[in-house]
C-alpha cells in the first residue's frame, strides 16, 4: 500500500465525520448505543492535531492523543468500501511510528466488549490485553503495546 497518512485539516472535518460514521454505524444495534467515536467533536480533534487521514478520497481516519507516558489510540476508522485493502494495518503501523517519534514507550487503546472483531484483530498487531473494565455505560477491553515491538504483519 502506497497511501500516505497526513494530518487532517479543517477542510477534512466533514469527511472525517462521514468515514467515522460509516465505519462505526453498524455497531449501534449491536451495542445498543451510538459508539463514542461517532459522538466526537471532530472539528476540535482536527484543530488539536490529533486526527490523521489516509486516501484520496479519504477512506481511513485515525485519532491519536499523546499523553505524558503513552500514546492513546482514540479511534481508528476504515470506510466500509475500503475494508480489506490494508488501510487499517497502515494506520496501526503509523501509530507505532508516531509513538516512537514522540518518544512514547506505549500505545494504549480500548474497544467495546461487543466489538468482538477488534478483540481478534489487535493481538495480531502486537497489542496485549490488559483488563476488562466498565466505564459508565461502556463495557471495554483495554489493550497496550510497546511501539518498539513489531508484529508479524
Image (cartoon, grey):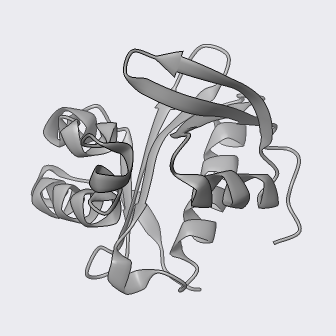
Front-most of 74 and 39?
Answer: 39
Residue appearing at x 85%, y 61% in the figure: 151
Q: Is residue 50 above or below residue 15?
A: above
Residue 77, position as x, y percentages in the image: 40, 60
Q: Nearer the viewer, residue 3 or 85?
A: 85
Q: Residue at x 63, y 69 (%)?
A: 89
Q: Is residue 117 left or right of residue 47?
A: right
Q: Is 72 displayed left or right of 145 in the figure?
A: left
- Quarter containing the N terminus: bottom right
* Quarter of the image where the C terminus is located: bottom right
**Left or right: 53 as drawn, with respect to 116:** left
Residue that appears at 13% across and 50% down: 10
Q: Position of residue 5 (x, y in %)?
A: 46, 65
Query: Measuring 41% from the left and 83% from the top, which residue is drawn there?
Result: 82
Please state the horizontal and vertical placement of residue 46, each as a whole percent of the image: 25, 42
User: Measured from the top left, where is residue 21 in percent x and y?
Assistant: 23, 58
Horizontal side, residue 136 vs residue 141: left or right: left
Give the total of numbered labels: 0
Q: Quadrant of residue 127?
A: top right
| Relative vertical location of residue 104 with respect to residue 63 in this rendering, above or below | above
Q: Quadrant of residue 61?
A: bottom left
Q: Give the answer, above or below, for where 6 lies relative to 100.
A: below
Amino acid at each position: 500500500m502506497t497511501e500516505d497518512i497526513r494530518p487532517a485539516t479543517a477542510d477534512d472535518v466533514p469527511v472525517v465525520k462521514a468515514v467515522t460514521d460509516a465505519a462505526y454505524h453498524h455497531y449501534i444495534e449491536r451495542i445498543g448505543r451510538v459508539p463514542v467515536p461517532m459522538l466526537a467533536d471532530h472539528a476540535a480533534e482536527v484543530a488539536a492535531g490529533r486526527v490523521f487521514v489516509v486516501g484520496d478520497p479519504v477512506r481511513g481516519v485515525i485519532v491519536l492523543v499523546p499523553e505524558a507516558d503513552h500514546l492513546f489510540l482514540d479511534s481508528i476508522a476504515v470506510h466500509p468500501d475500503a475494508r480489506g485493502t490494508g488501510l487499517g494495518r497502515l494506520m496501526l503501523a503509523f501509530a507505532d511510528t508516531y509513538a516512537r517519534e514522540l518518544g512514547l514507550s506505549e500505545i494504549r487503546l480500548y474497544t467495546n466488549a461487543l466489538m468482538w472483531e477488534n478483540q481478534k484483530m489487535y493481538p495480531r498487531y502486537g497489542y496485549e490485553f490488559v483488563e476488562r473494565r466498565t466505564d459508565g455505560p461502556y463495557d471495554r477491553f483495554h489493550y497496550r503495546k510497546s511501539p518498539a515491538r513489531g508484529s508479524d504483519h
